[in-house]
Amino acid sequence: MSDSTLQAAGVVLEARQIIGFIPHRLPALLVQRVTILDEQRARGTMRVGHRVCDGHFPEHEIFPGHWWPELAAQTVGVMIGHDRGGQVNGWLHKFTVEVIKPAAPGDTLVVEVVLTRVSRASIEYAAQGFVNDELAYYGPLNICVLARRRAAASPLPQPAPA
């Protein structure tokens, strides 16, 4: 799906707007653009720079695999914050990832998250990551929102009926 199709389908947030919804700042801010496709789906984008790969296999720099879940969690945080009208101040996440393809400096990473389940304790998303449009990882992402500041109360998102 092209960026122009995504922009027509949902809300596109750039880095200046993203920092209003999550507490991360550089160098911990990974997601550079979030497209909220609907109430249950979002897409986060990051272009890998050398700074995130420094020291990680210096002879053949690669994007650290443990940052994939963080990229997905930041995307979800922006989606929840945008939906609730305020900043998500913190969350815990648990992610079991299957990495298929590594990413290197210059690659574009895209993570897609889809809401799958809401319980009293957590929110679960299915996440997939792509490197230059090729599937690179997948797995479930569990999030527990710890604290939030919001303009107006709104319920947590709910998955679509099956």
Image: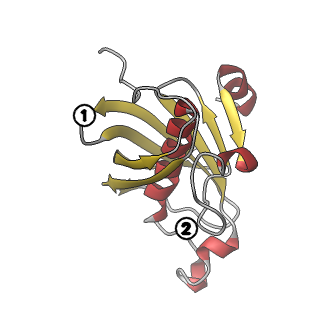
Residue 84: percent from the left, percent from the top? 52, 32
Q: On screen, 28 above or below 35?
A: below
Residue sitting at x 65%, y 21%:
9
Q: Reading the chain from its start, which is encountered first: label 1 or label 2?
A: 2
Residue 63 - label: 2
Residue at the spot of label 1: 119
The amino acid at mark 2 is Phe
Count of numbered circles in the view = 2
Rendered image quadrant of residue 133 = top right
Residue at image position (66%, 47%) is 18
Q: How far across and down, in percent of the image, does residue 75 sit?
A: 54, 45
Task: Return the x and y of residue 137 as percentages of the image width and height.
Answer: 43, 51
Q: Is residue 81 shown above or below 93?
A: above
Quarter assignment of residue 11? top right
**Split into 4 quadrants, where in the image is the N terminus?**
top right
* 5 horizontally vs 78: left or right: right
What amino acid type is highlighted by mark number 1? Ser
Q: What element carries label 1?
A: loop
Left or right: 150 as drawn, with respect to 94: right
Front residue of 92 and 160: 92
Name the colouring of the figure. secondary structure
Camera-nearest label, 1 or 2: 1
User: Which residue in the rendered view is the most extreme toward the top?
Assistant: 161
Question: Which residue lies at the image location 47% right of the left edge and 57% below the top edge?
Answer: 70
Q: Are marks 1 and 2 in contact (CB under 8 Å)?
A: no
Location of residue 125 by image quarter:
top left
Which of the pair 77/57 is nearer the observer?
Answer: 77
Q: Nearer the viewer, residue 131 or 162?
A: 162
**Residue in the picture at 60% in, 59% down:** 30
Q: Distance between the residues labelled 1 and 2?
A: 32 Å
Question: Which residue is situated farthest in the left direction here?
Answer: 120
- Please rate how many residues cluster around mark 2, counting C-alpha atoms within 10 Å: few if below 14, some from 14 to 19, many from 20: many
